[in-house]
Amino acid sequence: MNQRRKRLGDMLVEAGLISENQLQSTLKDKNPNQKLGDALLQRGLITEQQLIEVLEVQLGIPHVSLYRYPFDTNIFSIVPKDIAKRKLIIPLKKEGEKLLVAMADPMDFYTIDDLRLSTGFHIETAIATKDDILRAINKFYDMDEGFEELLIEQGTTKAGEDDKIIDQDSPIVKLVNQILTNAVTLKASDIHLDPQETKVIIRYRVDGVLRTERSLPKHMQSVLTARIKIMANLDITEHRIPQDGRIKINLDFHPVDLRVSTLPTVFGEKIVLRLLDLGMAINDITNLGFNKINLNRFLKLIEKPTGIVLITGPTGSGKSSTLYAALNRLNGDDVNIITVEDPVEFQLEGINQIQVNPNVGMTFAAGLRAILRQDPNVIMVGEIRDKETAEVSIRASLTGHLVLSTLHTNDSLGSITRLIDMGVEPFLVASSISGIVAQRLVRRVCRDCAEPQEPTRREMEIFEKRGLKIDTIVRGKGCSSCNMTGYKGRIAIHEVLVMDDVMRRVIMNGESFSRLREIALKNKTIFLIDDGLLKVKQGITTTEEVLRVAIPD
């Protein structure tokens, strides 16, 4: 077995996908029962597509792309859904006594034998990626799960409706579970249920971009809304005011936390579900996409015993992930960390987290005042929204605490003017803030279909303006693993502003904003656009993505 594994490693090295050092360190650190391919995937050294292409040569087993594959849904009854999901297999076609199945692991001979015995067919295998198989199972297996009766409008009584919403085997419950499972498989961050005049549209936000998944008939809107409200413990009789709730469920043995928000619109209630995949929570600060200079600056900021560190950016720019990664870094037996959040997104062990509840007077400011009597070392405030919260946070930092918080501004320097606009005295802002991190998320170029290209004239001009030179850029041409978008996954771009005495003097004297920018440039601050363009140069993202989130001067 080791011989086969070694050969796979050698082939990956020969193909130039990994270096000999990466291979040896992976072999040394991996779990003895873990396959080399899985260990390399886990470390992000190769993609599933690259692994499959090498396995295809090594094992002589063809690989198939299930994107737009002409499935014969009649043969799905041969392999039950639970087995297909557990073993990561899907039947492709039947020819006489032969059954062709796509497998994530074609060397799993136990599964092949089980299939042969349970189906009576001679099994032939092909390789497909795990994501491809799961996507196909979620899409095609559920087509025959009794949704037809849902699609036909029925004049059911109210009592009948209630049973439908709660019964685990009813079509509406299965449909909602399927919508959630699909979202997790596609790694969506949000699910939108948009009521229109004649239909209900279901959209997923994948890698920051919304796309329509399916459209359902209008008469299904009420049962769909009621089912989600029951799951989130909301009032199903109230349709006139917005409501917020939370759902915690296990999908395919995978814990998922959903934040639910309903909003009354002209055509009924619009529902948005924010997915927090608890299994995917980033806890390591080095995985957030900081470049070396910014990472060192950020670590120095959070390792100071006092002061305020602000993380800024619009909604959905990954501020919470950065905050939690910083808290995780600081978390230890010798520190008392207390957070006040609205809502508490990820629950971290060893950290005391407080949920804001304005209905009973538990605001950010009130929570903060109570925290200060609890002898904390590090305080995290979910968001600074008003003057009162800002002032209490500043006083906490001046009395010997490290305060981490977020603010909604466009860039790092804008946070200073925002705090002064809130009514905070400039001398308090200057003396308390240690540093500000501005952050945005850009889509990564899909590694499976990435290809180098010549930069355009416009791109060369943009790079020259920022004092950078570019020879080639990398773009994805679109493949099955990125759903033909050319992008897969996201990475953050950062701007880390470290406050120094000169900046503090400028703020206290109320000098112009442009003066602050000059000092930041002098201190070699890497602005958002620069960090983005450096990532384009490394082939991680594209110029279009960077310009979508960062504005050049």
Image (cartoon, rainbow, N blue to C red):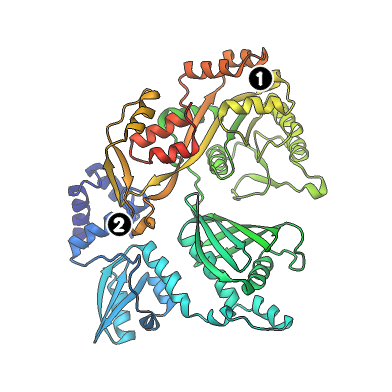
Is mark 2 in CB contact (under 8 Å) with mark 1? no
Q: Position of residue 31 (x, y in %)?
A: 35, 55
Q: Quick one: SS at disc 2?
A: helix
Give the camera-side residue of 201 and 103.
201
**Residue at the image position 69 percent from the left and 79 percent from the top:** 161
Of the image marks 2 and 1, the number of the one nearer the N terminus: 2
Neighbor class of circle 1 (other Cα within 10 Å; few <14, some 14-19, many 20+) is: some
Q: Is residue 301 above or below residue 97?
A: above
Q: Is residue 384 above or below residue 483?
A: above
> Does residue 537 appear to the left or right of 550 in the view shown?
left
> Does residue 211 appear to the left or right of 407 in the view shown?
left
Q: Which mark is residue 230?
A: none
Residue 111 sits in which quadrant? bottom left
Q: Quick one: SS at disc 1?
A: helix
Badge 2 amino acid: Gln
Mark 2 — residue? Answer: 49
Q: Disc 2 and disc 1: Cα gap in Å?
A: 52 Å
**Residue at the image position 77 percent from the left and 61 percent from the top:** 240
Mark 1 — residue? Answer: 431
> Does residue 426 appear to the left or right of 323 in the view shown?
right
Asked if residue 169 shows in the view, the reply is no
